[in-house]
Image (cartoon, coloured by chain):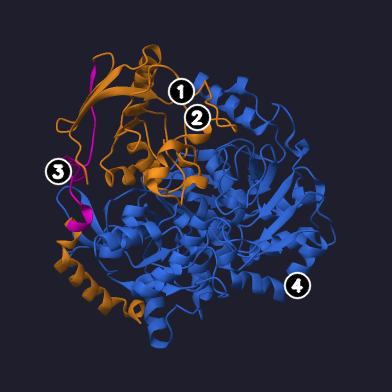
Amino acid sequence: MESFTTLEAPAVPIDQPNLDTDQIIPARFLGRPRESQAGHLFNDLRYDAQGKERPDFIMNKKGYEGAQIVVAERNFACGSSRETAVTVMVDNGLKAFVAPSFGDIFFNNCFQNGALPIRLAAARVAEIRAQLHAKPGAMVRIDLPSQTMVGPDGKTDRFEIDSFRKDCLLKGVDEVNLTLGYEKEIAAFEGRQHQEMSWLDR
Amino acid sequence: MATTQTMPPSTMFEKIWRRHVVVDRDDGYTLLYIDRHLMHDGSEGGFAQLRKRKLKLRRPDRGFATPDHYVLSDSRRTADIPDPQHRRLVERITENAAQSGVTLFDLGDERQGIAHVVGPEQGITQPGLTLVCGDSHTSTHGAMGALAFGIGTSEVAHVMATQCLWQRKPKAMRVSVDGKLGEGITAKDVILAIIAKIGAAGAVGHVIEYAGSAIRGMSIEGRLTVCNMSIEAGGKAGMVAPDDTTIAYLDGRPFAPEGAEWDKAVAFWRTVPSDQGAVFDRDVSLDAAAIVPMVTWGTSPEDALPITGRIPEPSTASDAAKKDSMERALDYMGLVPGTPLEQVAVDRVFIGSCTNSRIEDLRAAAKVAKGRKAVIPSWVVAGSGLVKKQAEAEGLDKIFLAAGFEWREPGCSMCVGMNGDTGKAGQRIASTSNRNFVGRQGPGVRTHLVSPAMAVAAAVSGHFTDVRRLLG
């Protein structure tokens, strides 16, 4: 997995609460090769039925073209477990997500793809979104080692992240390989469970 | 664990969690053992990652697969799937199961169906177990007293390779529904009322335990419906304590234990429920008697209202952001604020999905359909081949067909918008599924979530109708 350490990049604000992963990539584009999915990020928010850009969608507005950070509303990326919701973002250069809360599965899927989800207080996230609306293309700086984020206003926020997740992101740890290193413990567990819950092993 | 000290009272979730810890790291992360892994035609990505790593499934005996997302509801032949990439995914689950050794309920087998219907039906889902699937509605299985949650493709591959997952322990929340549900009020109305109360993010970071007399009084089918939509409240999982109802349901199921093993399992299952005095991080309660048939009006499952209500006025929103999101939802849904819900005309009806496609759902729907005629196109899609067979044995198919409904083949069908079963832009659908997201049933399609009985009431009236008037 690719590592994540620091990122200083333009950010795009997305104001809709409960924005679900069906909006990030509609179901009809799943079950396709990954390389063909990148063009369908936010497909139905971004394009109308004729494939024409909807001018009111934030990512179609001038100044947000090079965004690598999304600053969103509560319960961002809720709904379906589709990991494509993360990979399609990453393939469009979007590698960090800031919101008051996230859909739990999306949150976990980020760490499998070298992307960083950051939870901050709702009021602060709203403030940053307002700044990004006022100044399209404004920069946000994220520093994972120090767990800090600097907004367009130059104000620094500290964010919380599990040290396990932080470590894995910083080093680009492959979780499967990490877990295979615990073979002894897994086998011991299975031996114990076989004794206690033998009906599972028939 | 010190045996000389008395353990403080534990929640059911806490007990199951503790029992499945393989490694507890100092940094608060836990390697959790996974007892059951359900797979479907969308699981090819996990198998592909495994092949790339040249790894085998650690425990194929703990894996169960059935195609559901991409299968057709009007044919049982894989070859009939028009989209070659979708067809390939359905073929791949057959090949993957054969190569890996997981148990497969394939197309043509009467046990095939929606993974979240098949698991409990086959007795694969049992109390006290951990269960995962690469699908967010895995929360369904918690109705059996299991800890069950959805995961993404990379974690699917991780479970295939290691039978474990890295997890931070979520918090515990109890939602109590006490009292007696009124006539015509179903589990679907209960869960929609819960989500309307706590919001689509109301349970983020929590495992929900549903408790109270109304939940205890529900059948397993009803509990599965409630737990199914835990994810729509943001919950990591939803659970109901196993009891006599659960044990009676499991008795004789193909993958449930037998003989002495059954007795041993039952003795364990009796220890699974939360201890008296167990402390939850959050407690919410609802009065069952106050719940009426529910209908969603917007594009989030939290936008649910009693059928007696009216389309809400954005001007009453608490803040500008809320007002903006209500206006957006009303615009997409093509609804005028202030309109009584019963006056909203419906174009189509879908009865099915992992929320509401079990035998009890079909019985409730047939009860309303009997002797009436659908005035709009209406589908019934049973959750599994066995549900379909049971319904046919009870003559429910005849009732639906006589009422002008289509009686179709098991799968996710119109819930998921990825197998050809979609509505047309602008169509308004009364649906027993779980998500009214923008475009969920096809671009521009307007989805309203309802119970099976309420879906039939809409089908025979052409508009949303309080089903209580059609009963009795």
Name the one closer to the observer, B212 or B453: B453
Answer yes or no: are tags 4 and 2 on the same subunit. Answer: no
Tell me the SS state at disc 2.
helix
Taking the magenta stretch, the answer to whether it contains residue A164 is: yes
Observer able to see residue B183: no
Residue range in magenta is A155-177
- The kind of residue tagged 3 is Lys
Instruction: Tell me which residue sits at (42%, 32%) in the image.
Output: A74
Tell me the SS state at disc 1.
helix
Mark nearest the camera among 3 and 1 is 1
Left or right: residue B388 compared with residue B54: right
Question: What residue is disc 3 on?
Answer: A171
Determine which of the numbered discs, if any, sits on residue A60 in the image: 1
Percent position of residue A104, x then y: 37, 44
Question: What residue is disc 4 on?
Answer: B395
Tell me the SS state at disc 4.
loop
As measured in the structure, the alpha-carbon distance from the residue carrying label 4 to the one carrying label 3 is: 61 Å
Q: Which chain is orange?
A: A
